[in-house]
Amino acid sequence: AISILFARAGAKVLLADRDQANAETTLATIKEEGGEATVFVGDVTINADCRGMADAAVARYGRLDVLVNNVAVRPHKPILEITDEEWHTTLGINMHAAFYLCRAVLPGMMERKTGSIIALGGQSAITGRPGTSMVTTAKTGVLGLIRAVAAEMAPYNIRANMVNPLSLIPI
């Protein structure tokens, strides 16, 4: 939905997804509405893929102005039932991906002295609730990263913000 709205506003969009079929569905919608987009299939938990996404956007469109980091898994489980693998996977998908993506797009933004990074968070970035220790830790980490990026990149006119929508549905 975010990609479709950006395309409707005239943005040229790089759709990055692990699932090519999912990305192609979004691509079809954007093209049907007269927008411009391309697909990059990759895994945001892999640094090289994040760099590849940024490089693909620049190769296709000449520059990358906005990064929307809409990457998340939200497992809910009592803390004493969490396996090491679940913990590492949740942090890898939520927090490490945000770091890799920021690091991939920032050099070009710094060179042009403009850009915007938008991370999607949620209530878990602000409050802790039972059964959410994994996602609360990960999203709080992303919030800290975004705050630090905003402070560090301010001299380059690069904005970094995190949107934390309130969930009205109990999760």
Image (tube, rainbow, N blue to C red):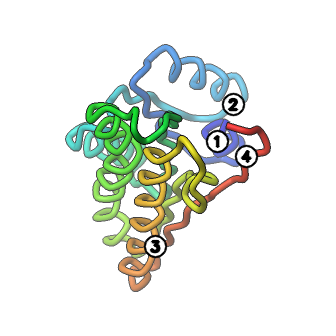
Which residue is drawn at the image coordinates 29% and 54% (left, top)? 104
Q: Is residue 104 left or right of residue 98?
A: left
How far across and down, in percent of the image, does residue 118 sit? 53, 58
Q: Amino acid at mark 2?
A: Gly
Sequence-wise, which precedes: disc 2 or disc 1?
A: 1
User: Which of marks 4 and 3 precedes in the sequence?
Assistant: 3
**Is residue 88 or residue 84 the one in the foreground?**
84
Q: Residue at x 47, y 60 (%)?
A: 140
Query: Disc 3 versus disc 1: distance between alpha carbons?
Result: 22 Å
- Rendered location of residue 131, percent (x, y): 54, 41
The answer to which of 125 and 78 lies nearer the viewer is 78
Residue 80 location (% of width, % of height): 39, 38
Q: Which residue is mark 1?
A: 2
What amino acid is at disc 4?
Answer: Ser
Query: Do the residues bearing badges 4 and 2 touch, measured as CB atoms within 8 Å?
Result: no
| Amino acid type at image mark 1 | Ile
Identify the residue at image location x=48%, y=49%. 69
Q: Which residue is mark 2?
A: 34
